[in-house]
Image (tube, rainbow, N blue to C red):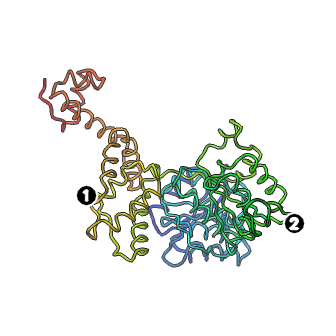
Amino acid sequence: MAEHTRVWIVDDDEAIRFVLQRALQKDGYSVQAFSKVGDIAGALQSDSPDVIVTDIRLPDADGLSVLETLDQMGKEIPVIAITGFSDLDQAVSAFKQGVFDYIAKPFDLEQVLSVVARACAGNKAAHRGDAAGGSGRLIGESAAMQDVFRTIGRLSRTAISVLITGETGSGKEVVARALHEHSPRASGPFVAINTAAIPSDLLESELFGHERGAFTGAHARRAGRFEEASGGTLFLDEIGDMPLPLQTRLLRVLAEGDYYRVGGRDLLSANVRVIAATHQDLEAKIAAGSFREDLYHRLNVINIALPPLRERQEDIPALASHFLQAAALEMGLEVKRFRPETIDRLQQMSWPGNIRQLQNLCQQLCVMAPGEQIFIEDLPPDTVSQAGSESVDGWPEHLRHWMRQSLRSGRPDLMAAAREQLERVALNCALEYTNGKRIEAARLLGLGRNTLTRKLKELEGVEADGV
């Protein structure tokens, strides 16, 4: 299928050029590789590939400058950007400049092949736009967060409705603000309301406003959140807690684009983009009859599912450092830093409160930790005990963290290494528990005695009394 399809690669890393070129050629593509922007710009004067795959940070220029070159030449060639230094602003900027897709290092070759195939299937590069503004506060190098960055980037030129789902404290409002800041409505207001925090009998007035005398206590006309957010974005947090009668009214506003204040007769235009969020399973609430299915489909045009912090442990070092610096700046205190072993301990936790819990901890440590470096001993006792209590039930998470770190470092033969470590730990612990009695250890492990003896010889480092 890829036969005669030409792909150009631009990367200053010879190893990456080799890996990409080999994988693409194996898939049937004709591949040409370059190490500098200047080289590919020169080649474009007389030739044109079907797809360009470029690193962003190159020695002579920004890799995305090839988009400007293509624009000047009037050539529409899909450009796929690859970078090892990814953040939200860069992702949004790349999409606004017109990349077909954006891939963060370390990348999966299958992912690259899939994106190249889509680009070759007739998709055209996106229209060029202005560079992204705003101050994105989203932090994350994990694959899940890179997906979030890409989604925000793709949505940066639209005002489409978005539903953000995720556990409490996972950063849903931060994502909503990023969607607003990187949208055509960025110059308008961002208005947030937590529908679960307002009594149901007051929520309608809070959203749509009211006229004087509309109800007891309404002594003057009051603008609602829809009016306050006019020209911008209205963020409805915890939408799953909205009462059914109000869901019906919200659906009408979204469908028809206008509404009345409570007790009012003047028809007002709802000039807002609605972003909703919930930690609840709305499909289950629909099945239970407590959430309208038609409203769900109105809100859930695009879904952004935020991962809990326990599933993005590789982001904890950067998040913790960011929160620690922010707390120091806010309170006028000296900036502190975590010891490596302290970060390791934080990565062992399950973080039921997610990012909010980590942020609160960093604020506490900024005030209470006595020195410039934060040691494990400086962590609150409940934090230390929580990490320790997870050592048994949470061992798959530790294995997942080790595997991710090893994959990023390029360590070979990971399955063999993981299997060897598992067997070594299991045999050591079983023999320690049985005071070296091999028959008893084998029974507890579900192994035959001969199998256990053979594994002991293979591992060699396991001590036993030979009983």
Of pointers 1 and 2, the one earlier in the residue sequence = 2
Farthest front residue?
216
- Amino acid carrying label 2: it is Asp
> Which corner quadrant holds the C terminus?
top left
Residue 125 percent location from the top left of the image: 70, 65
Left or right of residue 203: residue 410: left
Left or right of residue 385: residue 67: right
Q: Nearer the viewer, residue 161 or 133?
A: 161
Look at the picture and state if 344 lies above or below 283: below
Q: Which residue is mark 2?
A: 266
The residue at 41%/46% (across/down) is: 400
Residue 327 percent location from the top left of the image: 41, 70
- Report the Cα–Cα distance between label 1 and label 2: 63 Å
Left or right of residue 382: residue 163: right
Look at the picture and state if 438 lies above or below 139: above
Q: Which mark is residue 352?
A: none
Residue 345 percent location from the top left of the image: 32, 53
Element assignment for label 1: helix
- Amino acid carrying label 1: it is Glu
Q: Which residue is mark 1?
A: 377
